[in-house]
Image (tube, grey):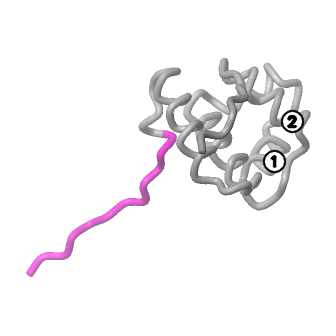
Amino acid sequence: MSKTKTTKYDIAEHLRTPEEMAAYLEACLEESQGDGAFVAKALGDIARAKGMTQIARDTGLSRESLYKALSGDRMPSFDTILKVVQALGLELRAAPIQT
């Protein structure tokens, strides 16, 4: 019996269009249950898909600090989140909760 080779799945390799990136972020926001680090990780996935160097330039933050902030291990400042969202070409919106 031969062994099956597996590789680590990286969502960033599959986020190709702005629509896919927005849909991924929206799904993560819905699944986050208020976990800001989870949302930050999702933004990090999208930033890696777009190119972390370009996002760093557009936000005025270093690549290293972006990787740390968007790793999912810590809670970045809301200012950082807003800068990243704008650099990604996305926007945050508010809507009433459907009951």
As displayed, is residue 96 above or below residue 35? Answer: above
Q: Is residue 67 left or right of residue 14?
A: right
Q: Quadrant of the N terminus?
A: bottom left
Name above or below for residue 65 compared with residue 6: above
Disc 1 crowd rating (10 Å Cα; few below 14, some 14-19, many 20+) is: many
Q: Residue at x 67, y 57 (%)?
A: 33
In percent of width and height, residue 32 lies at: 64, 54
Q: Along the line of sight, which residue is nearer the eye, 80 or 3?
A: 80
Q: Residues within 10 Å of mark 2 (few under 14, many from 20)?
A: some
- Mark 2 in CB contact with mark 1 (< 8 angstroms): yes
Magenta span of residues: 1-12
Q: Tag 2's secondary structure?
A: helix
Q: Amino acid at mark 2?
A: Thr
Q: Amino acid at mark 1?
A: Ala
Q: Which of 33/41 is in front?
A: 33
Position of 6 with respect to 89 (left or right) is left
Is the magenta region chiefly helix, strand or loop? loop
Please give the name of the residue rendered at 19% of the width and 75% of the height, measured from the top-left corner: 3
Q: Residue furthest front?
A: 99
Q: Position of residue 61 (x, y in %)?
A: 87, 31
**Tag 1 residue:** 69
The mark that comes first in sequence, 2 or 1, is: 1
